């Protein structure tokens, strides 16, 4: 894998998104103090303009960055594995009893029986139970965030790629999609993973965000990849470290620009410190 190609790809994804945001907040849709005062005089009287200027930026930043993890993963996987697609629709057939068991497993995880603790997730046990089901084959389609058809391993991989602190509903949907992919007959996917692009807790064994833990054993399920596990599967050894280095480097430049050009202030001491680890 060409390290330079991956670095260039990461830079391209991030700079295109950030430059679009900067153009919006500086040129096409800037924060106008007088407009803010006119629309929300009570807020303006009580709270410094800089606070609302910050929220103005945030709203215009969050939307275009919604799919950034998938775009970055696509750049890395395309270079390393030779074929990667975002938003790939995979169509196959799943036995009726397998579909029923999928819903049964999810319902047991979601709803606690009266007087009993909620069922603890266990990917291997759940998948084995589902695959033992038979029944009439029913056409089923699943859209996965990232699909890799590896020229390196000769295997197909599907990923549900989420931000580090996902909510419960989206995690449930992801698990259902993964079950359906692996329940298709004949087999369409060799492996399906629930992947978090970054781990704010540091080590996998310390991950402690409660919402996805309702659906997965986040520390032990082999179907869960967090941070370096994910990046190194899609890009090879050292990919995560390389990815973090590139993002931190770009971040310093953009943070300085935002302080100077958007907020109109000098960057505070320590603004260029490393954020991602």
Image (cartoon, helix red, strand yellow):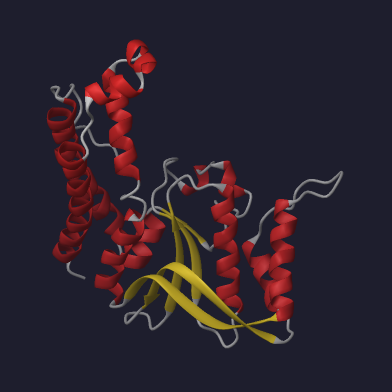
Q: Is residue 157 above or below residue 257?
A: below
Q: Is residue 75 above or below residue 149?
A: above
* Residue in the image at 73% along x and 58% along y: 107
Q: Quadrant of the C terminus?
A: top left
The quadrant holding residue 72 is bottom left
Number of numbered tags placed on the structure image: 0
The quadrant holding residue 177 is bottom right
* Whether residue 276 can be seen here: no
Residue 22: percent from the left, percent from the top? 18, 42
> Horizontal placement of 39 versus 245: left or right?
right
* Residue in the image at 58% along x and 42% along y: 210
* Whether residue 117 can be seen here: yes
* Front-lying residue, 86 or 57: 57
Residue 122: percent from the left, percent from the top? 66, 59
Residue 182: percent from the left, percent from the top? 57, 75
> Horizontal placement of 130 versus 258: left or right?
right
* Residue in the image at 41% along x and 58% along y: 229
Identity of the residue furthest to the top in this view:
45
């Amino acid at each position: 894998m060409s390290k330079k190609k991956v670095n260039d790809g990461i830079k391209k994804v991030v700079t295109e998104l950030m430059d679009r945001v900067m153009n919006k907040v500086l040129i096409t849709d800037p924060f106008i103090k007088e407009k803010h005062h006119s629309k929300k005089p009570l807020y303006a009287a009580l709270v410094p303009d800089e606070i609302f200027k910050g929220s103005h930026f945030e709203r215009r930043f969050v939307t275009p960055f919604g799919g950034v993890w998938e775009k970055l993963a696509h750049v890395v996987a395309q270079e390393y594995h030779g074929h990667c697609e975002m938003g790939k629709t995979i169509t196959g057939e799943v036995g009726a009893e397998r579909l029923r068991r999928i819903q049964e497993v999810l319902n047991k995880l979601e709803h606690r029986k009266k007087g009993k603790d909620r069922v603890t997730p266990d990917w291997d046990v759940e998948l084995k139970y589902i695959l033992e089901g038979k029944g009439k084959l029913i056409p089923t389609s699943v859209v996965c965030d990232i699909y890799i058809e590896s020229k390196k391993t000769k295997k197909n991989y599907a990923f549900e790629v989420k931000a580090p602190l996902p909510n419960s509903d989206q995690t449930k949907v992801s698990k259902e999609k993964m079950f359906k992919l692996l329940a298709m007959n004949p087999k369409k996917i060799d492996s399906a993973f629930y992947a978090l692009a970054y781990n704010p807790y540091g080590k996998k064994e310390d991950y402690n965000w409660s919402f996805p833990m309702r659906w997965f054993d986040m520390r032990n399920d082999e179907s869960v990849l967090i941070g370096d596990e994910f990046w190194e599967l899609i890009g090879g050894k050292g990919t995560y470290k390389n990815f973090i280095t590139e993002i931190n480097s770009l971040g310093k430049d953009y943070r300085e620009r935002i302080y100077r050009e958007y907020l109109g202030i000098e960057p505070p001491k320590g603004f260029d410190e490393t954020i991602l680890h």
